[in-house]
């Protein structure tokens, strides 16, 4: 069996969509799981859609996600160039299109736009409905060699079309979807070489995949309908057909196709929103594939070892943003603290400008966030005590209300004023002693104190941890403010 060779062949049209990242990831995992090669090829023959700087985005994304290619524009292993426009400049695609013409498998087409508008037909679908499609009528196939040569000599614009049979059926096999059969009368004589001399995406793909020895073609299932045309080309050339692996559609939570306008459809969108690269890769791997043991957290190397593309699903994969946030939170919890601190520091400084111990604040939030932008909203009370509703002092479980909280704060204030050591451990011990002396429950005392020093219903840490960071002066000032608010009420 030949060595497994897969490729990722993106068009440089902007940020890398989640679907493109998944295609790259699956192609990488299939190759590496079998000890094969992963190739990067840039498909830039659609000059109109090309975006400046997009190739840099592709390289940067693959580097960041660890999907390192074995061959590509910067690593020629003998089957380059790996950029289609460079291959086009060598006349490669026209050469192979002419080979098909010589074999009767392709032909020159000189029809103009007006005539092409007339080429449409109505077909009946399996459910009985009728559908109008444009199918070229092979008009130029009947031109004699002399007529073709005369038009070429006269400079008449042309395209080169595939000569597809319009009777019978074509069957192709996909390793996920099985055997799929289509009627040949539904297949158009697709264009191989456009009027500008550039190959179409479909034709360049087949030629390049064959010449680069690609054994497994991974792509989205939107290309299922094109696969019979690909097979026809392989058969026309007499080439071996690669293994097809079509990935399921990715939808949003409303079951609509994931749109580039949704705000989190690209890798860079997600990184900009505070997600961790490793979590994104892990999450994307599960969009259409699941391991036999239903495990959810994987490193890239663990994915390589576990990935069996036969376990991919046919059903659409839902991009569950909530699950991604949960998974990202798991990665943050497991992250080395120094790495976390470096990532978290800009978000801490965004909310707090005071000279406080930012490392303690970082330790406080590390297990409480799902994405880094969660940090400012959790810690902004360190900068300034917010205006808050005294209803927060009421907590049924702690058996506290405004009246009991006022009494507790008044009782504990002198104890905290007498306390010099404002470390978390010392404060906690002092308050535990106070609770024991008074015969209270811990929450009966700590809830009012935490409310007073934070002004928040939810905080990333308890009262004494907050007070340690605030320091004695600020902590007492806030408790006195709480007493005043409760008395005024």
Image (spheres, rainbow, N blue to C red):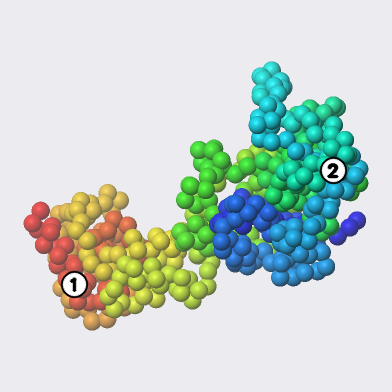
> Residue sitting at 26 percent across and 51 percent down?
395
> Residue sitting at 69 percent across and 32 percent down?
116
Observer-nearest residue: 399 or 170?
Answer: 170
Whichever of callouts 1 and 2 sits on the residue coming sooner in the sequence is: 2
The N terminus sits in image quarter: bottom right
Observer-nearest residue: 445 or 217?
Answer: 217
Q: Badge 1, how many Cα within 10 Å: few under 14, some, many 20+?
A: some
> Residue sitting at 20 percent across and 51 percent down?
391
Percent position of residue 457, x then y = 29, 55
Label 1 – label 2 distance at C-alpha: 95 Å
Considering every residue shown, the one lying at the far left of the view is 488
Percent position of residue 333, x then y = 50, 65
Above or below 203: residue 457: below
> Residue sitting at 85 percent across and 26 percent down?
167
- In the drawing, does residue 296 fall left or right of residue 368? right
Percent position of residue 344, x then y = 43, 69
Q: Quadrant of residue 158?
A: top right
Percent position of residue 410, x then y = 14, 65
Considering every residue shown, the one lying at the far bottom of the view is 420
Residue 63 visible? The answer is yes
- In the drawing, does residue 471 fall left or right of residue 84? left
Q: Which residue is mark 1?
A: 476
Above or below 334: residue 189: above
- In the drawing, does residue 260 fall left or right of residue 58? left
Q: Which residue is mark 2?
A: 149
Above or below 120: residue 362: below
- For discs 1 and 2, the disc positioned in front in the rendered view: 2
């Amino acid at each position: 069996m030949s060595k497994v060779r897969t490729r990722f062949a993106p068009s440089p049209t902007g940020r890398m969509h989640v679907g493109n990242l998944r295609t790259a990831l699956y192609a990488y995992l299939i190759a590496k799981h079998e000890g094969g090669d992963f190739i990067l090829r840039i498909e830039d023959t659609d000059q109109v859609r090309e975006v400046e700087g997009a190739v840099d985005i592709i390289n940067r994304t693959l580097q960041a996600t660890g999907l390192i290619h074995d061959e590509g524009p910067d690593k020629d292993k003998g089957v380059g160039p790996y950029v289609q426009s460079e291959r086009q400049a060598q006349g490669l695609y026209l050469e192979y299109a002419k080979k098909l013409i010589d074999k009767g498998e392709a032909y020159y087409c000189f029809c103009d736009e007006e005539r092409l508008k007339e080429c449409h037909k109505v077909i009946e679908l399996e459910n009985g409905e009728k559908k109008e499609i444009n199918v070229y009528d092979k008009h130029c196939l009947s031109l004699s060699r002399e007529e073709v040569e005369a038009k070429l000599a006269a400079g008449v614009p042309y395209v080169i079309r595939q000569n597809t049979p319009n009777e019978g059926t074509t069957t192709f096999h996909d390793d996920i979807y099985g055997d799929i059969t289509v009627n040949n009368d539904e297949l158009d004589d697709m264009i191989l070489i456009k009027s500008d001399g550039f190959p179409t995406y479909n034709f360049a793909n087949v030629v390049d995949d064959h010449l680069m020895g690609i054994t497994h073609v991974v792509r989205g299932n939107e290309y299922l309908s094109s696969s019979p045309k690909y097979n026809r080309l392989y058969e026309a050339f007499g080439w071996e057909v690669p293994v097809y692996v079509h990935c399921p559609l990715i939808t949003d939570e409303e079951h609509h196709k994931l749109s580039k306008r949704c705000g989190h459809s690209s890798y860079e969108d997600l990184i900009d929103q505070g997600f961790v690269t490793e979590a994104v890769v892990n999450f994307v791997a599960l969009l259409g594939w699941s391991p036999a043991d239903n495990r959810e957290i994987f490193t890239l190397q663990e994915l390589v070892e576990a990935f069996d593309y036969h376990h991919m699903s046919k059903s659409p994969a839902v991009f569950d943003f909530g699950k991604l946030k949960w998974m990202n939170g798991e990665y943050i919890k497991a992250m080395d603290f120094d790495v976390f601190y470096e990532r978290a520091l800009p978000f801490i400084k965004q909310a707090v400008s005071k000279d406080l111990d930012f490392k303690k604040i970082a330790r406080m939030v590390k297990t409480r966030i799902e994405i880094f932008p969660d940090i400012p909203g959790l810690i902004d009370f360190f900068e300034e005590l917010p205006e808050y509703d005294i209803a927060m002092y009421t907590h049924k479980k702690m058996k506290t209300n405004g009246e009991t909280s006022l009494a507790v704060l008044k009782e504990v204030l002198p104890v905290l004023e007498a306390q010099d050591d404002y470390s978390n451990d010392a404060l906690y011990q002092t308050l535990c002693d106070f609770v024991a002396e008074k015969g209270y429950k811990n929450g009966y005392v700590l809830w009012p104190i935490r409310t007073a020093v934070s002004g928040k219903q939810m905080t990333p840490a308890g009262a004494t941890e907050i007070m340690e960071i605030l320091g004695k002066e600020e902590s007492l000032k806030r408790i006195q403010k709480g007493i005043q608010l409760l008395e005024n009420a």
